[in-house]
Structures are given as structure tokens and as C-alpha cells.
Amino acid sequence: MTESHVYPIGRFNPPVMFDASEAQNNIARVEKLPENLLSIIQSFPEKCWEKSYRENGWNARQIVHHLADSHMNALIRFKLALTEDNPVIKPYEQDKFATLPDSLEMDPKISWGIIEGVHYRLVHLLKHMTSEDFQRSYIHPEYNKTYPLFIVLALYAWHGEHHAGQLEVIKTLHG
């Protein structure tokens, strides 16, 4: 296993301050994920769904279901931060989510449909946010850290591409 298998697009590098053009670029990246993911899923070899990019890592099926779980949480976290003053969000045990029957057994296209709908709503919300809105934040209690929404936007833009890259690694290694 190499660093490029685990982080095919590199590690997340958060922005230091809000930049409107960077935010627009990140919104475009978030908007493209459903289409990019569908392209990967449609060409994904059936024999590869149970394969991973590394030993003891999530398999391809779990990665797609994780993206749906994670990005559903992203939409809620944005909405909380936009409607409350610096709310404390609810973390979740993503590794435990990945071992539940839906993540282990269901067709990844089910989660793609969730991702498509969630991203449609999230992108609509993001495109209507002001510079001030992107300065709003939430507290992540697991890390005891405050996250401004412009950083959260960059994180989820990276996150979708990161896991799409892992799916491509799996296809290359096992396809």
C-alpha cells in the first residue's frame, strides 16, 4: 500500500481564510461529485465491490455508502450552522456505520441516488450563501474545534474526490 492508494488526490489542505473564487471552485467540485461517481459506478467491475484499496480498509461498496452517510451529515451540519449560532454538531462512528448491513450488502447505486439528491440540495444552498454565511461555524466535539463553513465546504469537496479516487485505485488494482 502506498500513500497514493490511501490519499489518491493528496491529503486535505484546509484554506486559511475565506476566498470567494475558491468557494465557487469548491461548490463546482461538490456539484460534480454525483456525475463523477455515477461514471465510476457504471463502469465498476462487479468483482471489485468487495475489494479494498488497502488491507483492512473499507471495500468499494462501503466507500460509496460512506459517501452517502457523510454527505447527508454535511447537509445537516451546514443547515445547523446557518440557523444556529456556532452549534455543536453530532459526530457519528463512521467505521461502525460501514459495518452495518446496509453498507455491507446493498447495491451502491442506492447510495448514489442519495448522494445525487443530497448534493442537489446542498449545492442549491451553497450557491445562495453569502460571504458572511461562509464565516459561520459549528463546533465538532470529537475534535473540540470550531469549523467555519468555508473550511467545511473545502473539506467536503476534497472528501468526495478523495473517495472517488480510492474507487479508481480499487478498479486499477483489482479490475
Image: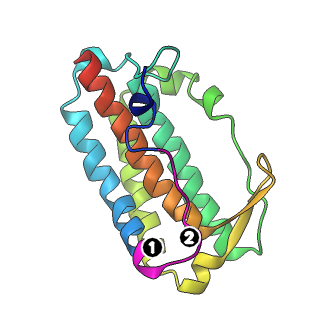
Q: Position of residue 10 (x, y in %)?
A: 43, 44
Residue shown at 62%/28% (left/top)? Answer: 95
- Quarter of the figure with the N terminus: top left
> Label 2, on which residue?
150
Residue numbers of the magenta segment: 11-23
- The CA span between labels 2 and 1 is 7 Å
Q: Earlier in the sequence, mark 2 or mark 1?
A: 1
Residue shown at 43%/22% (left/top)? Answer: 59
Q: Secondary structure at mark 2?
A: helix
Residue 117 vs residue 34, the one in the foreground: 34
Q: Are marks 2 and 1 in contact (CB under 8 Å)?
A: yes
Which secondary structure class fits the magenta region best? loop
Residue shown at 47%/43% (left/top)? Answer: 68
Amino acid, disc 2: Phe
Amino acid, disc 1: Ala
Vertical side of 14 occupied by 23: above or below:
below
> Label 1, on which residue?
23
